[in-house]
Image: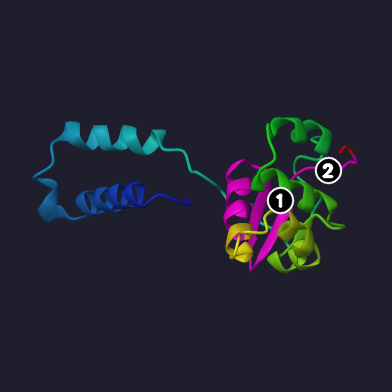
Amino acid sequence: MYIDNELVFDIDKDYHELTENDDLIRIVSLKNLDDIEIIKKNIKPVYTPKQKSLEFDKPIHSTITTEDIIPLFKENTWRKLMFKVIDQFDEDVFTKETFNEYKGKIHKAYPLNKHPDDKIRQILQQLRNLGLVAFLGNRFYERLWTPTEFY
């Protein structure tokens, strides 16, 4: 199970310590254990990385296109800009270095930002949380939609 929340991780760790240590079990009532078990069953992971082979597959949302997603961005924001940049990539799998070719466009849109690399990383995390990008590990990301010329 992938846990992206420190509090949930601590609860899970405490639960296992209590249930696996015979000396501590006596201080916990059965109702406490039942409550903990219910909480554990209802916790949903924030993000589950997909297993990837060395050869990358097609996007998992191959029926979702740029035309489906772009209207969801209500205004011009970093997220919308990054989405448009990723949409222009030739490959579905990319790294942060892929953005180097587009840094002029990014700087033109946000000339006062002095830390564009940090912002790119932050927006990639946000796009991952929205389910539009997957982090594959080893610096690799995957676009999870099929690009189409729309804008």
Instruction: Name which residue lies at 81% across and 50% down.
Output: 58
* Left or right: 141, with 64 as reference point: left
* Left or right: 150, with 142 as reference point: right
Residue situated in front as seen by the camera: 96 or 40 = 96
Q: Would you place residue 69 above or below residue 125 in this image?
A: above
Q: Does the magenta stretch include residue 106?
A: no
**Local secondary structure at mark 2:** loop
**Local secondary structure at mark 1:** helix
Q: Distance between the residues labelled 2 and 1?
A: 15 Å
Instruction: Name which residue lies at 71% across and 51% down.
Output: 82
Q: Looking at the picture, how far across and down is residue 10, in whole percent?
A: 29, 52
Marker disc for residue 82: 1
Q: Sort mark 2 into few (<14), some (14-19) or many (20+) by Cα contacts within 10 Å.
A: some
Q: Mark 2 points at which residue?
A: 146
* Left or right: 17, with 53 as reference point: left
Instruction: Name which residue lies at 70% across and 43% down.
Output: 80
Q: Would you place residue 82 above or below residue 96 in this image?
A: above
Q: Give the range drawn in magenta.
A: 121-149
